[in-house]
Image: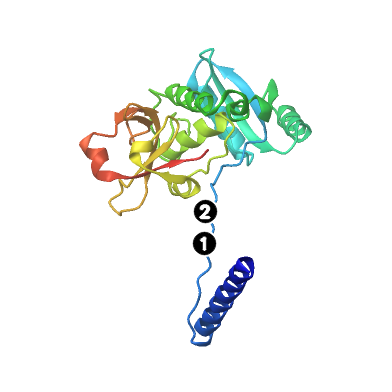
Amino acid sequence: MEKVKKNSLSVALFLIVVLLLQSCASRGVKVQPVSPRPQKRQLAMMGYTIQAGAFAQVENAVRLTDKLKGQGLDATYFKAADGLFKVRFGNFSSKEKARLRAQSLQSMGVIEAFYVVLPEDSAVAKRRQYGDDYLRESLVKSARDFIGVPYLWGGASAETGFDCSGLTMTVYQLNGLDLPRHSRTQYDAGDTIDRSDLKKGDLVFFATSGRGKVSHVGIYIGNGQFIHAPSRGKKIRIDSLTAEYFVQHYVGAKKYF
């Protein structure tokens, strides 16, 4: 008998809920569905890229970068572990496509020796084995290699240099993550984090143009510091987030993995 009473009570409560919902609908009251939790955004991984050149002088790497851009290819240079400046370009879906494109450029005399960089050799791929800290340290190391390179608005050129977003894009791509080109699109592509939650490899953004919009970006390296290309005529360097100028122009921080 007790079980029958409980079942009857449950049925009654169910009917009451149904009637209430119907009543709300008849009066034009909208019952809002529960919003799903936002999905974590992640950058796409780089595909197969091509590496060419090994220059003692950065100007030579810059000239090759410009030649490749003239062929309609995304290209960037970097300082390798052996101290030489090298160039990477392209983003191909297969090793064969990368090899054929490189051979075509080789036959045109644009590049000489080359090799295809495999996606599985990137820091982001090795993150699965070694963890997030491995990728974060690799990003910081790549950024440090650019310290002392002159700034130039618009990216690499024969005058040698990077703009702020060109630097962060290059650092991420060298580690296997396809970061967008411009500071505003980089800002939109990441997940917002509090300043207190910053970790190595996250990006920090500033509004420095006087229009209240994101116009500058740097890569966080820990201990309240970040690496960035500050402005024309200056070199890529380390600065502090606690410096008055950056406190006043700080917009926010983003993470990408």
Q: Which mark is residue 38?
A: 2
Q: Secondary structure at mark 2?
A: loop
What amino acid is found at the position of numbered circle 2 in the picture?
Pro
Q: Residues within 10 Å of mark 2 (few under 14, many from 20)?
A: few
Identify the residue position indicated by label 1 in the image. 35
25 versus 249 height, above or below: below
What amino acid is found at the position of numbered circle 1 in the picture?
Ser
Q: Residues within 10 Å of mark 1 (few under 14, many from 20)?
A: few
In-front residue for pair 240/198: 198
86 versus 14 height, above or below: above
Estimate the x, y position of residue 90 in percent, counting from the top left.
Answer: 64, 36
Estimate the x, y position of residue 4 in percent, counting from the top left.
Answer: 64, 70
Q: Residue at horizontal 34%, vertical 39%? A: 195
In-front residue for pair 30/135: 30
In-front residue for pair 153/19: 19
Task: Report which quarter residue 202 is drawn in.
Answer: top left
